[in-house]
Image (spheres, grey):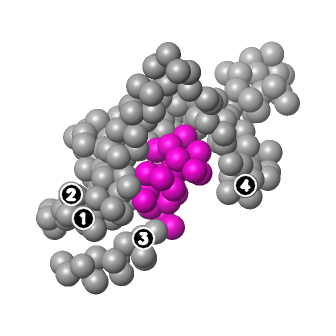
Amino acid sequence: MQISELKAELEKLHDSSFGWALSCCRHDAAEAEEVLQTVYLKILEGKARYGGESKLKTWLFAVIRKTAASERRRRLLRMMKPLGGTAAVFNSEPAAALERSDLQRRFQEALKCLPRRQRETLHLVFYQDLSLREAAQVMGISIGSARRHYERGKERLREALDGKESQYAVGWRRKENSGAVL
């Protein structure tokens, strides 16, 4: 793939790439921007090469994920030094539009409580519109593991949201409301 073609494809994928970077960076917009810039530099400098074994989007998301993980490790090492690190400041402006409704806010809270692999799998499938096979490639795991993380993540989300729902009203499932007269 020529460099001009690659640049054009990267531009087309920028919005979804930024969304994935946000997810990998725990919704810290500044960190996501930095990770994405690092990824683009890696690609343009030839440090990360697309070999054509998978879709460009799948390969790009894997590079973003690995770069975010290495940046997180570097930041943790810097914070462990005796100089003392400062806490990251979260820019909530991009996320504010998504969290306007109460349901969306509860969903985001439930999603954050999931284990990392389950959260990543659900994000790739639902928000980035990847198949389970493509999500497995991005994450560097088998399709069976991706399927297991996907199913368990959906179930844990369902349980978390059902649990919050029962705080507001009578549970809607028969087993949750065993005292109801039928």
Vertical order, 85 against 149 (above or below): above
Under mark 1, the amino acid is Glu
Q: Tell me the tag on residue 77.
A: none
- Look at the numbered disc 4 and give the secondary structure of its residue: helix
Q: Earlier in the sequence, mark 1 or mark 3?
A: 3
Q: Residue at x 43, y 59 (%)?
A: 37
Residue labelled with disc 1: 45
**Crowding near pointer 4: few (<14 within 10 Å), some, many (20+)?**
few
Q: Are marks 2 and 1 in contact (CB under 8 Å)?
A: yes
Q: Are marks 4 and 3 in contact (CB under 8 Å)?
A: no
Q: Tell me the tag on residue 47.
A: 2
The Cα–Cα distance between marks 1 and 3, rounded to whole angstroms, is 19 Å
The Cα–Cα distance between marks 2 and 1, rounded to whole angstroms, is 6 Å
Badge nearest the viewer, 1 or 4: 1
Q: Earlier in the sequence, mark 1 or mark 4?
A: 1
Residue labelled with disc 4: 93
Residue labelled with disc 3: 13
Q: Earlier in the sequence, mark 4 or mark 3?
A: 3
Q: Which residues are magenta?
A: 15-37
